[in-house]
Amino acid sequence: MASQASQASQAFSADDDTVERGAYLARAGDCVACHSTEDGKSFAGGLAIESPFGTIYSTNITPDKEHGIGNYTEAEFAAALREGKRADGANLYPAMPYPSYARLTDDDVHALYTYFMEGVAPVADNAPETDLSFPFNQRWGITAWNWLFADADTFTPDTSADAKIERGRYLVEGLGHCGSCHTPRGLAQQEKGLDDGSDSYLSGADLNDWWAPSLRGGDGGDGRGIEGWSAPEIAEYLKTGRNVHATVGGEMTSVVAHSTSHLTDEDLTGIALYLKSLPANPAGEKATTSDQRREASEKTDAHLTAAKDLSEGERLYLDNCSACHLNDGKGAERVFPAIDGNSLVNADNPTGLIHTILAGATPPATPAIPAQLPMPGFGWRLSDDEVATLATFVRGAWGNDGDAVTADQVDKVRKTLKPSALNRAPDANGSLNHEDRDTQ
Amino acid sequence: MAKQQPRVDAVIVGLGWTGSIMGMELTEAGLNVLALERGADRTNEDFAYPKPADELEYGIRHTMMQKPKQAAVTIRRDLEERALPQRKLGAFLPGDGVGGAGAHWTGVLIRPTPTDLQLKSFADQAFGKGVLQDDMQIQDFGVTWDELEPHFTFFEKVCGQSGTTGNLNGEIQEGGDPFEGPRSEPYPLPALQDTQNTEMFDKAARQLGYHPFPNPSANVSEAWTNPYGMQLGPCNYCGFCSRYGCLNYSKASPQTCILNALKQRSNFAYRTNANVTRVELAQDGKTATGVTYIDEHGEEVFQPADMVILASYSLNNVRLMLNSGIGKPYDPVARTGTVGRNYAYQIGGGIHMYFDDIEFNPFATAGATGRMFNDFSPGNFDSAPYGFIGGAKMHSSQASGTPIKTPLPKSAPKWGQGYKDALQQRYGHHMKLSMTGSVMSYRSNMLDLDPTWKDPYGMPLLRMTFDWKQNEHRLSAFMRDRLREIADVLKPDYRDESFNLEGSHFKVTSYVSTHNVGGAVMGTDPSTSAINRYLQSWDVHNVFVPGGNAFPQNFQANPTDLIGALTYWSAKKIREEYLKNPGPLMSA
Amino acid sequence: MSSRIKNRQRRDFLRGSLTMIPAITLGSGVTLTAQAAEPAPNLSDYQPAFFSDEEWSFLLAACDRLIPGESEGKGPGALDTNVPVFIDRQMDSPYGHAERWYMQGPFVLDGSPDLGFQYPYTPRDVYQKGIAMTQAYCQQQYGKRFETLDNDTRDTVLKALEANDIDFASLGESQKLEASEFFASLLENTKEGYLADPIHGGNKNMAAWKMVGFPGARASYRDWVDQHNVDYPLGPVSLTGERG
């Protein structure tokens, strides 16, 4: 998709600075993620977005006059972006993060408009119509919702603050719409806080059962997660999808691939500094100290290495995981993520961990780090009981402190899996040579 | 009339190490590049744990290797014998599929010595007339250590080479190989850990005054991010390297080191199951117009290109040249022609030792664990009195502990209760002392087209004429005596040995080495080389032929490091000169 | 007070976006079940797919002599580990059909054996012909089928095959398949079945691996490689996750 977009921009107005800036901003907003399908053309829409109210299909935002937004004036475009108003006056479903995009400066809206009109190839395809059931098909209802939740203003920099941090804040609150996933939601599915005025803002949230960890990177918590990352490490993570602490997984994989890995080092530094300026979530009551965690880590490591009197969970770890994550649970810097202290492993909701064990995971290919070393899925190799035992072990081993996992929880996740090359059982007759049998 | 594809700037035949390197270099120069790979696509996903840990499938059934069905080689030992097709794999195991042999190699990444590159000059100076066989056809590579050094260094960074530096800018370093050529930079990563056999070999070799050092390895000792942003995991000594894809992504391969980066480039594309049968030439025969291949549906397709890179296995590169009429075929009687001339190989031998009371845990290892010494490479000892030239790397490696291949004493029963007892008694109690020796080039060791057998597309198979000569037999006997001295120090409970001594001939039935080299050798004289020192065909200037085929004879080190370095060397010349002014880079 | 702080106060309450993220990875109906490591069959219950009943009887009897069971020395035998099942399954693999081999004629059968296999036969052919001729030999020599001979006589026949002392040509072989060639395949495949991963049908319960001390497909020894001359304590694991 990346190359399609850049080729298109070359074709239309190769050296137009505004188009280029708009393309960059579209990256920062990750427009392509929702407005394209996996195999479809960039920005032609059609992606199914699951919401608690039903499936919403993203729209065609290419400049095609009939099927896309080719007839939009800049003012109409701005209203869609910031207020969720379609050119015909209808409300967009708030799957479009317009409450965040409301922050955009006029200048940036202009650049985005120019890019979508001149830098994107028109695609004459209709995206499927969103068809929600009553009452969610009543777009007028959104007017009320907007009145309640979505009257954010255009971003005004705080001139007394560090300009780099302010740039980061602009990107995080605005185009980056980080809060969409990382801020917990209220009863009406609204984010509990659209900016750092709220302690809930970016404090971590459950997203389709997958834990999107806290992005509040300042001091004051238990020292785990992003709180223990330096600003350059945060920037590296966004740029490459990995750093010495973690490798990106879940939905964030595509955010890194399509958006953050294309941002400039300055912008990434700004984002990182801003996140480091947010005080961490306060430590919970059962929080451990880093000394306690270190001691526990050494104990697990020594027991696994001695390989005597092993529990079933330990044995499963040695037989399935230790090849890459190693006995110390630390993995390999930037290549194999640490399990010890990993936020996904320790999350209250173990769905993300279970999913990763069952289905495997592949890090994104980013311009700086194109490497893709996939973690295999073990769904074909381990039963629900075994996965539960293994997950319970890793959540309690080393310095981790997650609760036990049950076979029922595993079963529930297993039912959602799609078959893929990563979770396929080996074929006893040459899994690499299917063509042998086919061509005979 | 064959189907025709849109023209590309450069077509690469084969997507292994050399094809991947050329892909990076030529796309970086802005060319539209297409790679055609005759095997299947293979990505890291195919090697995800635990799939490769299957000895039968990969170690025995050769699932990652070329299928003789597609293109066997016919083999004879001398010009009079009737060559017969190698119907199933044996002596050598070329790869196929994306990654080529680079996906299933062991991972020993070692440089030749400066002397190895100029062996003919060395021979002229160190050996009196009549000492060496008169049918020997050794020659210099036509490129020097200093010219190649930056390319070794870069390729080794691409691979995350792990080892101990022996000579840094002329300064000898403790623990490394004092005989290595001067390196401009230290090894990118520290050496692999030592296994039990390594420790024993090291001690015994030192006691005898040799200079052992850790095998230079492309199984990486620590996590590594290379200059392309590609990553390798730290080797976990899983014991599945040689013949296997790496389940821990710790072995340098096109997959782990290059391909994701290359595939990101919009001016690169590749097609699999695309079997190139010949290079098409313009009417005057001086340039190539593209290649013809058979696609996955069995249809013949013409792919026009301004430039053709033959980057398949060395043997197939030579076959493609012969089948396409590029250069003049070698005639061993008239001693004319160059394509097929100077095919060479590598020779092995070793002593198997069994120790009742030592646990070697042979499964806990990497392909390249172990140590070697270079005291017996050319120039480091005087072999003239023994009547041979060349040398051997002397080593103890424990590449794998997979049980089907368990070495058992020759005296052990082959079946019945005695076999079962031997298996229990000997598994995990064995270590080997090995020599890997150079093989010179000779008038009658050569490649040409077979007159009888054809591939499924009707193209003649390649015919190999090869045998061990007196020089190799003498070298083997000399090295055997040195290894025996080491075995005497180690005092095993039982030992036996196997060497190719006088009277022994090349056998295709069991594995020897996949270091098949030569046949389209590089040089500075078009009457004795098929390609010039930039790996460009002397006869068809827009055809380049990187690979082991370029070696005018073989040395004792493993070939991959030199193949990688030569490919970068060739690519640099293409980028800096050829693209600006296409034509012969050297005048004949 | 900066405008930013004012904004913050106004928004402390009741604001947010309904933004959902696209659900690409979750949410399809396919259930992938762990192949609850299908238990290895009992050899006596196994119905061979390739071999006829008569051939199967030969195979069982021959494998039992090549790697005998507990009655002769410690450790499991070929029959205890389902080696014949392995061989039967191999007959329908790319190997059994010689799918990867070069099988185009002409077939020259009088070259040096050092130039390797030249028969126009797949392993399936070699087994069928080899078994038939060995049975013919046993009938000729002893008036009995191989599997009804006593152990010592079976060993005598196997040794004769191994040494190429049985003349297949005189028993009707037209393509010069030699007894030693058939024996070599049989022995090689028997050892493979004994020591390969159980996914291929043999090495039942990983018994042969346990016997020699090979940990199977664990493939993870970074913490073990530097522990020299120490007994490795852990049992094996198979490709499908069977633990021993």
Image: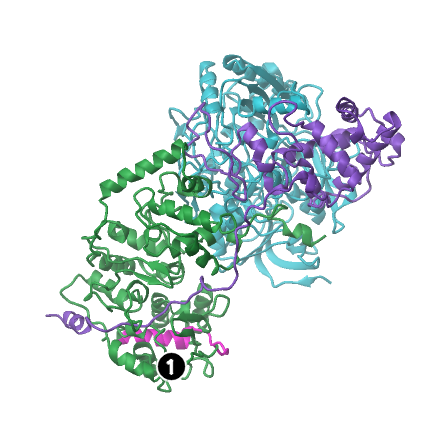
Task: Look at the image and say whether residue B421 sits in the magenta stretch.
Answer: no
Residue B148 drawn above or below residue B372: below
Residue B69 drawn above or below residue C109: below
Q: Viewer-proximal residue, B130 or C7?
A: C7
Task: Look at the image and say whether residue A107 sits in the magenta stretch.
Answer: yes
Residue visible at 46% across and 52% down in the picture: A358
The percent coordinates of residue B312 (x first, y second) are 61, 46
Highlighted magenta segment, given as a residue range: A106-127
Residue B163 drawn above or below residue A99: above
Res B278 seen here: no
Location of the N terminus of chain C by quadrant is bottom left
- The amino acid on which the numbered mark 1 sits, given as a three-letter code, is Pro
Neighbor class of circle 1 (other Cα within 10 Å; few <14, some 14-19, many 20+) is few
Which chain: green?
A: A
Which chain: cyan?
A: B
The percent coordinates of residue B305 (x first, y second) are 60, 57
Q: Viewer-proximal residue, B82 or C113?
A: C113
